[in-house]
Structure formats: C-alpha cells, structure tokens
C-alpha cells in the first residue's frame, strides 16, 4: 500500500499477463482505490498506486454508456462550468489532459434524477469541487467558451470572423 508499482511488477505479482483486467476487477468488485496516471500527475503511464486498503463503497450508477455518449455530444465534449474541452491541458495537473465526467446538476442525494435534463458534462477539477453541492446555473454563471464550443460550426466561424475583425492578428505571446 502506498508504493508505486509498474506493469512489470503487477504481471509478476499477479502471475497473469492481463493485469489491466484484474485492476478493473479490483476496482469494481473489491472497491479498491487503485490510481493511475489518469488520476495523479506524479504517476507515469503504466504506474499504479493503492492509496488505502479501505474499500470504496460501491454505488450503482444509473447512467448508461449510451446516455453518457448522448450527454457528451449534447454538451460539445466541454465542461459546462469552466469551458475546458476534451483533450485540453488540465489546469490542475499540468502535463495531463482534461478528463470529462457526467455530473448531476441536482445531486441524487438531494432528489435529483438521471434524466438527461439533470445531467451535464463536467471536468475532473470542477466535478471534484462540487461533491453534492448544488449551484443554480444563471445568466451570470454561463461560461462563454462553453457556449461557443457548443455552437454550430457556422456560428463559431461567425464569432471567429467578428473577433478577428475586432482584434486583427494580435497575439499575446
């Protein structure tokens, strides 16, 4: 516990070559909190760490892969709180890419549902700060970048042309 191991160590310890399947089983069936480079910036691809022997209580998720794909598509693969898009650099973990999640606007614990109208795309940084926190989305909280990313391509081009006309070819760098 607490020691970083790589794929070679895991294959040797487990005596199996399909260690990734076993890691998924340990996470889903045993509830073990095994982290990878997707979860912590200090881990390299192929490195894992078990943070605690205490299993995480399993929760049945009511969001299907189909519904998840539908919400990601609807929201333009963009965090609805900060505007970060899939593939952008993670502002919290430099060198890592943004990871997107499906977030309940009104948490299930407060009577929310798994209906599409109560779901939105949220990045890891914004989602970890929300944990059962309901923030009503109003006109002042709408992120302009998220709105632009969701707009049809012709609208994005119109906005681009407007900004180019207004600012020319100025560059911050």
Image (cartoon, rainbow, N blue to C red):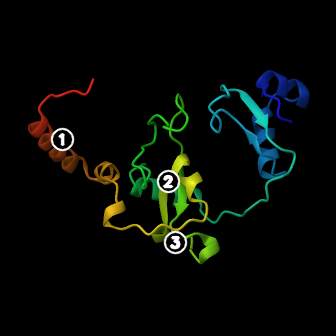
Does dot 1 land on a helix, a strand or a loop?
helix
Q: Residue 62 carries which label?
A: none
Give the residue at the far left of this rendering.
165
Q: Tell me the residue at 78%/39% (across/down).
A: 23
Mark in front: 1 vs 3: 1
Q: Mark 2 points at which residue?
A: 122
Quadrant of the snapshot with the C terminus: top left
Does dot 2 land on a helix, a strand or a loop?
strand
Q: Tell me the residue at 77%/34% (across/down).
A: 49
Q: Assess whether mark 2 and mark 3 are in contact (beta carbons under 8 angstroms).
A: no
Q: Residues within 10 Å of mark 1 (few under 14, many from 20)?
A: few
- Which of pointers 1 and 3 lies earlier in the amino acid sequence? 3
Quadrant of the snapshot with the N terminus: top right
Q: How far from the left and from the top, in percent, is residue 172?
A: 25, 28
Q: How far from the left and from the top, in percent, is residue 157?
A: 18, 43
Q: Name the residue under label 3.
A: 115
Q: How many labels does the image show?
A: 3
Q: Which mark is residue 160?
A: 1
Q: How far apart are marks 1 and 3 (CA)?
A: 34 Å
123 left or right of 57 in image: left
Q: How far from the left and from the top, in percent, is residue 51?
A: 79, 40
- Which of pointers 2 and 1 lies earlier in the amino acid sequence? 2
Query: Which one is in front, 162 or 92?
Result: 92
Q: Tell me the residue at 86%/50% (across/down).
A: 54
91 left or right of 107 in image: left
């Amino acid at each position: 516990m607490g020691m970083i191991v790589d794929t070679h160590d895991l294959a040797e310890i487990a005596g199996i070559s399909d260690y990734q399947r076993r890691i998924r089983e340990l996470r889903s069936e045993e509830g073990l909190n095994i982290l990878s480079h997707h979860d912590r910036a200090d881990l390299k691809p192929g490195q894992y760490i078990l943070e605690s022997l205490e299993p995480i209580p399993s929760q049945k998720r009511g969001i299907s892969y189909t519904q998840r794909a539908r919400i990601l598509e609807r929201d333009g693969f963009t965090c609805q709180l900060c505007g970060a898009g899939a593939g952008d650099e993670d502002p919290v973990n430099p060198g890592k890419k943004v990871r997107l999640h499906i977030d309940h606007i009104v948490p299930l614990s407060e009577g929310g549902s798994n209906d599409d109208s109560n779901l939105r795309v949220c990045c890891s940084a914004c989602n970890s700060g929300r944990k059962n926190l309901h923030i009503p989305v109003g006109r002042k909280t709408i992120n302009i970048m998220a709105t632009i990313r969701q707009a049809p391509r012709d609208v994005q081009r119109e906005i681009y042309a407007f900004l180019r006309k207004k600012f020319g070819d100025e560059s911050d760098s």
